[in-house]
Image (cartoon, rainbow, N blue to C red):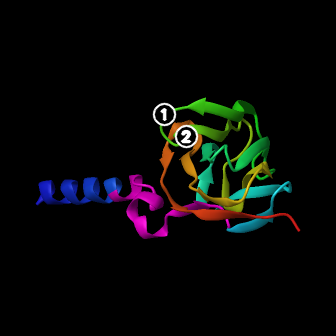
Amino acid sequence: MMIKKILLVVLVLLVLAVPASAQDVSRSAIVGVDDVTVSVGETFTVPVWIHGVSNLYGYDVRLPHDQAILQGVSVDHGGWLIPGFVIRQGFYEWNGPGCGGYCAWYAMTQLRPALPVSGSGTLIFVTYRALQPGTVALVPWSQLSAAGGIPIYANTQTATVTVVEGK
């Protein structure tokens, strides 16, 4: 009888130790961008946003694009978290995960005593100049973390940039 009580207490402690985000995978965060249509020669900004995240403390976001159609202008902080340490900011040539050759890249973490953030907001702003007509799929890649580097899993919403002849 005593062993059953001990096992029950251990089971309850294990359930309480697993974060809510790990218990309910259907409530994953979503990192995404929205469709946009622009004219050749136009400079425009694409916000990369997040919805439904819990305890976000740092992130690494990459947004690859076709350099023949879009020219990268700037990558800026979205203003939602307090950037304590910016690890990477700008446009990079790299064939690794989430970049596929060339991408906008922003990685940062907060520093203590900053608190984790939950909810929805803009992670980064990526500004482009449209070079020629065509379409570009924007597929955000992200690694999110809670304090201590604990991974936060997120789904992705992709978008299309359509560049049309100038007006």
Q: Please, what is the three-letter code of the amino acid marked with disc 1?
A: Gly
Question: Residue 26, image x and y in percent?
Answer: 43, 70
Range drawn in magenta: 15-34
Residue at point 55%, 40% (across, down): 99
**Residue at 31% over, 60% down:** 12
Element type at mark 1: loop
In this orientation, does residue 13 appear?
yes
Confirm whether the magenta stretch covers residue 118: no
Residue 40 percent across, percent down from the top left: 81, 58
In reply to whether residue 26 is colored magenta, the answer given is yes
Left or right relative to 40: residue 89:
left
Q: Which residue: 59% across, 41% down?
A: 147
| Frontmost residue, 11 versus 63 | 63
Mark 2, other Cα within 10 Å: few <14 / some 14–19 / many ≥20: many
Quadrant of residue 62 in the image? Answer: top right
The image quadrant where one finds the N terminus is bottom left
Q: Residue furthest right?
A: 167
Q: Are marks 1 and 2 in contact (CB under 8 Å)?
A: yes
Q: Disc 2 designates what residue?
A: 99
Which residue position is annotated with label 1? 96
Q: Nearer the viewer, residue 66 or 156?
A: 66
